[in-house]
Image (cartoon, helix red, strand yellow):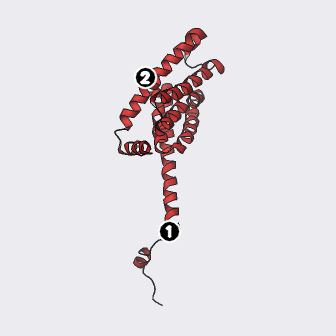
Amino acid sequence: MKRESIFEYLRRPVPLYLRQHSFQTRKAHVMVALGSLASSLSALLHVSGVLLPGFGQIIGAFSSLPLIAVTLMVPGVGFLAMIAASCLAAMFHPLSGLILLLTYGPLGFVMGLSIYYRLPRYLVLMFSGSVLAGGICLVVFGLGLPAFALLRLTGLTVSVPLVAGMVLLYCWLWLDLVQVFLARLPYFARVNGQNSQE
């Protein structure tokens, strides 16, 4: 019986079930890599407010962007990336991790999910704003954490409209930024086109 060479072995047709398994394995690896990258970037941006006082607060406002991006690519990974980012931020600064988990993390996930499913603009703003406003009120008034100090100095009659206005402006700016920036990337343009056709 003739022995098979290595080149003949490599040229063998791969069975369908093995090809499907290989594809699923690669897909899982890509999903894990995307989630890890998004959670790491989000945590790093969020804790920059602690590491770089003053200017870091501006950088920390961008912590939602990686979560929005990964949710647009793989919606199921967005929630896990949010949890992982909060845990990573808590390793640097426990309060920052909790704030990310309750405010900017859910904002990124909900906004990414809303854009992915092509919800109308007012619904995206309503859902994202409600999540962010609820998280801020929970942090400030529910848990009494030393965050968003300006809101704690004012009464409820002033702070609630202030939170609503700030949240609406913040989410509106984020929505415009995300739609303008991500629409220029081929992957997101293709995803949005497929969703609009569906």
Q: CA distance from mark 2 to mark 1?
A: 54 Å
Viewer-side residue, 164 vs 192: 192
Viewer-side residue, 59 vs 134: 134
| Residue 159 numbered tag | none
Q: Which residue is mark 2?
A: 55
Which SS class for mark 1? helix
Q: Quadrant of the C terminus?
A: top left
Label 1 neighbourhood size at 10 Å, few (<14), some (14-19), many (20+)?
A: few
Q: Looking at the picture, which amino acid does disc 2 mark?
A: Phe
**Residue at horizontal 36%, vertical 38%?**
183
Image coords of residue 196 (percent x, y): 42, 42
Q: Is residue 105 left or right of residue 59?
A: right
Q: Looking at the picture, which amino acid does disc 1 mark?
A: Leu
Answer yes or no: is residue 111 visible: yes
Image coords of residue 72 (percent x, y): 46, 41
Viewer-side residue, 37 vs 131: 131
Question: Can you tell which quarter of the image residue 13 is in?
Answer: bottom left
Residue 38 against residue 28 in the figure, above or below: above
Image coords of residue 137 (percent x, y): 60, 20
Q: Which residue is mark 1?
A: 16
Q: Compare marks 2 and 1 and give the one earlier in the sequence.
A: 1
